[in-house]
């Protein structure tokens, strides 16, 4: 990743990072100046700023949440995804309500108090989602429920919210319309995705935005567009995923970005939105063994433990680099050791968004 910078470019980038920390905003050309540079010194400088900001808001806490991959059917046909509609090699599944509640119960026993239900467009009708959410809230009233289930109508989102869901994370992969169109088939429209995000926020959800770094056709400008979107939309939650393609997808020849690019992006997001709940996904560990550890040091403060049944773990394959799922107790202990080693501690409460005082 590292390249040589001129003294002038280096000075300007360092000044922009100071400005971003101070003002939490830049114009698009300034964001692009930062995203176009691949220099180790800037990654470290941004990381130091980001760590300082997240400690000011969240102290040394890292929230642990429980991920349940409830199904792998999808109406979409994204160019990189292993559960894309046209992948005839993928064995499909959908967890029953009883299985989902069993996953929640297993996580609850180990202290987890936030459950993230994840699939993609078309896995479950809205009425079924509401039924499941209502049962989770009745069974675990002291827990938060996050949904990441793709696109629904405004009315259906309202029903999910009133059923008891607290948060909703919507994958959009790209904030640039042209880039989005290259990643997705014609039936998945950029404007509709944006409308869904606005609906979620207006209804009252803590709203999450997920985008990808290193995807096909991404440029320093399209990456800058993502940062500008975070600044303007002000999501409560953000997930940044390294790009991995699946062997049964048209994008199989594309390779993921370096870990340095990933953690640099995390740091920039933290500087843009100091109070954000910022995930470092298990995919960071697919790039480097210490990927999640370095992501936390770069500004992330949320980690998810997979609660899905081991029998379906390999079936939810968005890409080919998914890490093996271990026993929940073992994963939690590994996370505790990891966070303590770098001066942080794991916590299991609802992980509410905090604000700068």
Image (spheres, helix red, strand yellow):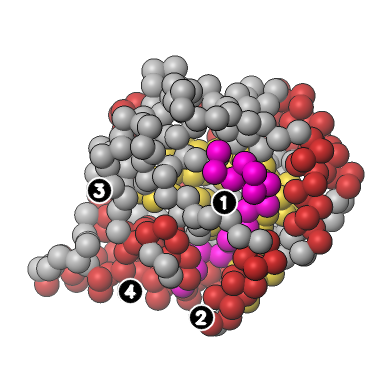
What is the spatial separation of the Cα atoms under label 3 and label 1, in whole angstroms?
Answer: 23 Å
Q: Residue at x 59, y 45 (%)?
A: 313
Q: Closer to the camera, 295 or 195?
A: 295
State which tag comes first along the sequence, 1 or 2: 1
Residue 90 image label: none
Q: Quadrant of the C terminus?
A: bottom right
State which tag comes first along the sequence, 3 or 4: 4
**Is disc 2 placed on a helix, strand or loop?**
loop
Residue 139 to residue 202: above or below? below
What is the spatial separation of the Cα atoms under label 2 and label 4, in whole angstroms?
Answer: 15 Å
Badge 4 density bin: few <14, some 14–19, many ≥20, Cα 10 Å: some
**Is disc 1 placed on a helix, strand or loop?**
strand
**Is disc 4 placed on a helix, strand or loop?**
helix
State which tag comes first along the sequence, 2 or 3: 3
Q: Determine which residue is flagged by label 4.
A: 44
What is the spatial separation of the Cα atoms under label 3 and label 4, in whole angstroms?
Answer: 19 Å
Q: Nearer the viewer, mark 2 or mark 3?
A: 2
Residue 43 appears at what percent x and percent y?
A: 31, 69
Residue bounds of the magenta highlight? 295-315
Residue 312 appears at what percent x and percent y?
A: 62, 41
Q: Residue at x 44, y 17 (%)?
A: 187
Q: Determine which residue is flagged by label 1.
A: 237
- Corner quadrant of residue 202: top right
Q: Determine which residue is flagged by label 3.
A: 220
Q: Determine which residue is flagged by label 2.
A: 342
């Amino acid at each position: 990743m590292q390249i040589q910078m001129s003294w002038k470019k280096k000075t300007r980038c360092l000044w922009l990072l100071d400005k971003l920390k101070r003002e939490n905003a830049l114009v698009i050309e300034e964001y692009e100046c930062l995203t176009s540079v691949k220099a180790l010194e800037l990654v470290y400088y941004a990381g130091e700023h980001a760590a300082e900001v997240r400690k000011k808001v969240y102290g040394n806490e890292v929230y642990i949440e429980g991920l349940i991959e409830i199904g792998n059917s999808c109406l979409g046909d994204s160019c990189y995804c292993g559960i894309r509609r046209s992948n005839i090699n993928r064995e499909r599944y959908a967890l029953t309500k009883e299985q989902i509640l069993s996953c929640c119960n297993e996580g609850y026993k180990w202290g987890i108090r936030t459950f993230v239900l994840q699939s993609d467009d078309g896995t479950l009708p809205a009425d079924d989602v509401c039924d499941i959410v209502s049962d989770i809230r009745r069974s675990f009233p002291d827990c938060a429920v996050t949904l990441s289930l793709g696109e629904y109508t405004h009315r259906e989102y309202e029903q999910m919210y009133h059923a008891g869901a607290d948060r909703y994370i919507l994958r959009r992969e790209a904030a640039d319309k042209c880039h989005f169109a290259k990643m997705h088939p014609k039936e998945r429209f950029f404007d509709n995705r944006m409308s869904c995000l606005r609906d979620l926020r207006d209804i009252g959800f803590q709203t999450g935005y997920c985008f990808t770094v290193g995807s096909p056709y991404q440029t320093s400008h399209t990456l800058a567009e993502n940062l500008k979107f975070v600044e303007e939309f002000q999501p409560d939650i953000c997930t940044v995923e390294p790009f991995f393609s699946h062997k049964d997808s048209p994008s199989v020849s594309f390779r993921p970005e370096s870990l340095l690019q990933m953690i640099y992006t995390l740091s920039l997001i933290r500087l843009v939105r100091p109070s954000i709940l910022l995930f470092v996904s298990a995919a960071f560990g697919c790039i480097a063994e210490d990927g999640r550890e370095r992501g936390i040091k770069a500004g992330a403060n949320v980690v998810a433990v997979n609660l899905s049944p081991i029998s379906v773990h390999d079936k939810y394959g968005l890409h080919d680099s998914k890490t093996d799922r271990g026993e929940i107790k073992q994963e939690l202990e590994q996370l505790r050791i990891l966070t303590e080693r770098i001066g942080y501690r794991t916590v299991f409460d609802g992980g509410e968004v905090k604000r700068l005082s």
